[in-house]
Amino acid sequence: NEEIEWWDYEDAEEMAEAVAGDIQFIIESAIDARGAAVVALAGGKTPLPIYAILSEAKLDWKRVTIIPGDERIVPLGDPLSNVTALAKTFLPKGARVMPIVPTATADYKAAGRSADALMQDLHWPLDLCLLGVGGDGHTASIFPGPDFDEALNGPKERRALGVMPDPLPPEAPVARVTLSRAAIVSSASVMIAVTGAAKKKVIEDAISQGAGSTYPIGRVLADTELPVDIHWAP
Ligand code: 6PG
């Protein structure tokens, strides 16, 4: 994929400033173009400084819809919930922050179907998909497990699905709902924000491995001429 571009920064603060500025630009462009913006923002900890800066931007927030790019299947308000962190930051600014897992359910596939139905009603493609990457090379909640192939190679119109990672990731050992690969690579803009040498190496290896990558991020980025900006800080 010739369209992958690395953007390296001195530190995480510099990256946060730059990425927040890029996201603001994408949102403003969508609002100029059609009066609204729909963005999928990554969960996890890396993007939190980005969101803190972005939330201070002078934007017409009521025209912005934010969804988590993936969600742990836990009750709303649970500290593991990605949408809870986004809601705390962006609801006070007037943005529309949408849970993609309305209620905790043991049936993760049903949760995935309801998330997909919800996303079928959103303007598509997404204006932005901001991704993180785990140390094991997962992105969004595309993890090895029984639903791995469906997340990567399911029907093009599938926007979200429920997944059961195997093994369960220690930081959040629960079933998930995730954007599908098709949803990610159809986005108007895809950005990755990661820190640390280990994750940089995982992504570099994943890209060089291509479609047969042992890392989910490699499988997501392979076989697409999607322009992807990878933002990295030590
Ligand atoms: C999630 C995230 C996930 C995250 C990576 C990296 O729900 O866990 O969406 O894909 O981006 O796990 O997380 P950190 O930024 O916390 O390392």
Image (cartoon, helix red, strand yellow):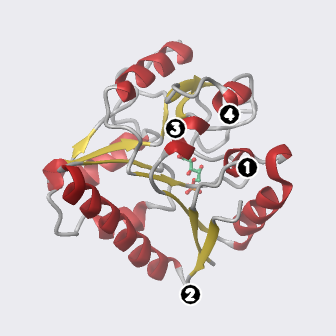
Between the residue at mark 2 and the residue at mark 1, the CA separation in whole angstroms equals 28 Å
Residue highlighted by disc 4 = 152
The mark nearer the N terminus, 2 or 1, is 2
Q: Give the secondary structure at mark 3.
A: helix
Image quarter of the C terminus: bottom right
Q: Residue 118, which numbered label?
A: none
Between the residue at mark 2 and the residue at mark 4, the CA separation in whole angstroms equals 33 Å
Q: Residue at x 38, y 29 (%)?
A: 119
Q: State whether residue 78 is above or below residue 136.
A: above
Does residue 104 appear left or right of residue 186 in this picture?
left
Residue highlighted by disc 3 = 183
Q: Residue at x 71, y 30 (%)?
A: 148
x, y percent for residue 24: 30, 66
Residue highlighted by disc 1 = 222
Q: Give the secondary structure at mark 4.
A: helix
Q: Specify the amino acid type for callout 2.
A: Glu
Q: Specify the amino acid type for callout 1.
A: Ala
